[in-house]
Amino acid sequence: MYEIIQEDRHLFLFLNNLGSQPFDQFWILISETWIWVPLYGIFLYLLYKTFKLKSLVFILIFIALGVTVSDQLAGIFKTGIARLRPCHDPTLNNLMRSVKCGGRLGFYSSHASNTFFIVTYLSILLFRKYKFLPYFLFFWAIVVSYSRIYLGVHFPMDVLMGSAMGFLLGGLFATISLNVIEKQKRNAVSNH
């Protein structure tokens, strides 16, 4: 395990030190949630066009529940694992670029988990109608996740674990959502 952590630190230092001050503000913006609100509006529109209002309500409930579970699980892991964020690790102070710093603990990245949850969930629900969408969504999630390393707030393993958890939770919640929507359609047909 020690070797894995050391390799993670080396990879972090390599990726983090690729950055330069002229790009810092760009990566800070990429990491902010509010900057993506227009994109969330587009997602909402695509979901509405695909599923209509009645199903959309269930979908939004599942998204809210899924992001909450994703975020809370990350918090539980952070407390349980208690791995310092790179920007709080005194052994890295003179070796890294610290653009921004968050809370003390970092394993695993809730930004990566939440973003990959949304991406996986939407990809599964919208793939049939919008074949190109998953490529764009996963590219977006990777960029957001990398921003966390660039800023100095997460190690690559934090981001990788967060991405994996978000991917798994997104798949689970999307499957449940599709089952609920299908049952809803069957009930509507049998009631007519």
Image (cartoon, rainbow, N blue to C red):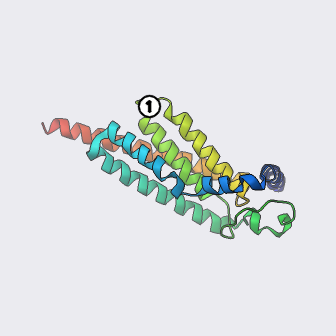
- Identify the element where label 1 is drawn: loop
Point 39% across, 39% down: residue: 46
Point 70% across, 64% down: residue: 100
Q: Position of residue 34 (x, y in %)?
A: 51, 58
Q: Against 84, is 116 above or below? A: above
Identify the amino acid type marked 1.
Answer: Tyr
Q: Position of residue 54 (x, y in %)?
A: 26, 46
**Quick one: 151 or 70, which is closer to the camera?**
151
Point 81% across, 55% down: residue: 9
Q: Position of residue 166 (x, y in %)?
A: 55, 50
Circle 1 Cα neighbour tier, 10 Å, few/some/many (<14 / 14–19 / ≥20): few
Q: Position of residue 91 (x, y in %)?
A: 85, 66
Q: Residue beneath label 1, please?
A: 130
Q: How many discs mark residues in the rendered view?
A: 1
Q: Against 135, is 12 above or below? A: below
Quarter location, residue 28: bottom right
* Viewer can see residue 70: yes
The quarter of the rendered structure image containing the N terminus is bottom right
Quarter location, residue 151: bottom right
* Viewer can see residue 171: no
**Quick one: 121 or 15, which is closer to the camera?**
15
Quarter location, residue 105: bottom right
**Quick one: 53 or 155, which is closer to the camera?**
53
